[in-house]
Image (cartoon, rainbow, N blue to C red):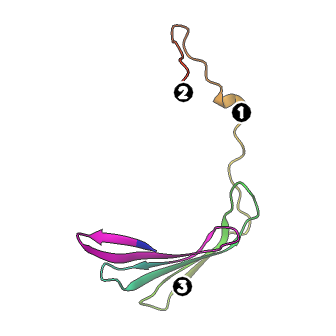
Amino acid sequence: SVFRSDGSLKMLKRRLWINRRNLQVEREIYYSSQGIPSMEFTRKNYTTDPYLPFPQIIEFQKLSGSKKVRLELRNPQFNSEIPTEKFNYKPPADYVLEPVN
């Protein structure tokens, strides 16, 4: 649970449900400034990519109404890997590098 502190008063701002097996957030409920549940988010069907687990189904619902929105990502594609040579750093000739302990 995430709390917002207004002086000495602590108000519940958000509650998280985390899957213990894969440590992914599966459900969130956001609370209004009065402490009333206002919005619910759920995430399902995470990709199996070990570097970027991503939910393929995202649902959100405003709890004061009955409308629900469902986003389904059928073939998510992400940026390709950046070649390692792009990370080679060559300082200017007059620059002195010192090791940091």
Magenta stretch, overall SS: strand
Q: Check disc 2 and give the amino acid type.
A: Asn
Instruction: From the image, tell me which residue sits under label 1.
Output: 84
* Residue 52 painted magenta: no
Residue 75 location (% of width, % of height): 74, 64
Rendered residue at 46%/74% (across/down) = 1
Q: Earlier in the sequence, mark 1 or mark 3?
A: 3
| Residues at marks 2 and 3, CA–CA distance in whole angstroms | 54 Å
Q: Check disc 3 and give the amino acid type.
A: Lys
Q: Check disc 1 and give the amino acid type.
A: Thr
Residue 8 image-quadrant placement: bottom left
Q: Residue furthest bottom?
A: 66
Q: Which mark is residue 68?
A: 3
Towards the viewer: 71 or 9 = 9
Q: State the extent of the magenta-drawn residues as a range.
A: 3-28
Q: Quadrant of the C terminus?
A: top right
* Residue 22 painted magenta: yes
Rendered residue at 51%/12% (across/down) = 95
Q: What element does badge 3 sit on?
A: strand
Residue 21 image-quadrant placement: bottom right
Q: Is residue 69 visible?
A: yes
Rendered residue at 68%/53% (across/down) = 78
